[in-house]
């Protein structure tokens, strides 16, 4: 009887090791989602770096362990608005953030503000529109400011966007 008990215990331990090996990352990230720590509570650091903060009412349905895509609540999609924020994480460290500002009509324009935490320069900016066949063109910070001014688009310290267009 003792021998069988020992065999059962060894088989159980082997089975647990095998399950841990196969599903370990999935289980770990379900219990401790890494990208969640870079949600709203990370806004103080975003503001310090000049990155658009994540508004508290944005949500994500994204269960990925290394990338979170945040969306605003349903709003008027016919006006200029922040469309989403993408936060990329690898090996428990934040790597990048991408913010998208959308102007739907008449040319379906998109301004992307991209910040990389581990490169210099940290910022890149792209602009695309239906006039450019949706291909993003790299632009300068001065061009970003000019576009936002032309759109009459402003963002307060909480991340809330306002536009009169």
Image (cartoon, rainbow, N blue to C red):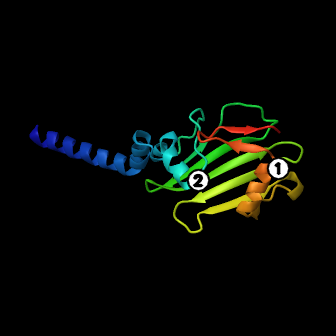
- Residue at image mark 1: 150
Closer to the camera, 11 or 157?
157
Residue 96 at x, y = what percent? 56, 56
Q: Quadrant of the C terminus?
A: top right
Establish if 73 lies above or below 84.
above
Label 2 and label 1: CA atoms lie apart by 21 Å
Q: Residue 71, located in which quarter of the rendered image?
A: top right
Left or right: where 76 falls relative to 29: right
Q: Secondary structure at mark 2?
A: loop
Residue 131 at x, y = what percent? 89, 55
- Residue at image mark 2: 50
Q: Earlier in the sequence, mark 2 or mark 1?
A: 2
Q: Quadrant of the N terminus?
A: top left
Closer to the camera, 47 or 60?
47
Q: Residue at x 82, y 49 (%)?
A: 150
Left or right: where 14 falls relative to 34: left
């Amino acid at each position: 009887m003792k021998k069988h008990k020992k065999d059962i215990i060894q088989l159980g331990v082997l089975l647990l090791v095998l399950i841990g090996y196969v599903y370990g990352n999935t289980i770990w990230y379900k219990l401790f989602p890494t990208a969640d720590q870079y949600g709203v509570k990370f806004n103080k650091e975003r503001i310090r770096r000049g990155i658009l903060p994540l508004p508290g009412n944005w949500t994500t349905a994204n269960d990925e362990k290394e990338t979170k895509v945040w969306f605003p609540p349903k709003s008027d999609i016919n006006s200029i608005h922040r469309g989403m924020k993408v936060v990329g994480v690898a090996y428990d460290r934040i790597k990048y953030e991408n913010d998208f500002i959308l102007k739907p009509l008449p040319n379906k324009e998109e301004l992307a503000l991209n910040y990389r935490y581990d490169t210099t320069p940290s910022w890149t900016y792209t602009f695309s529109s239906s006039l450019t066949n949706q291909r993003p063109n790299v632009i300068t910070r001065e061009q970003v400011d000019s576009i936002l001014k032309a759109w009459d688009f402003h963002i307060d310290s909480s991340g809330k966007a306002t536009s009169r267009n």
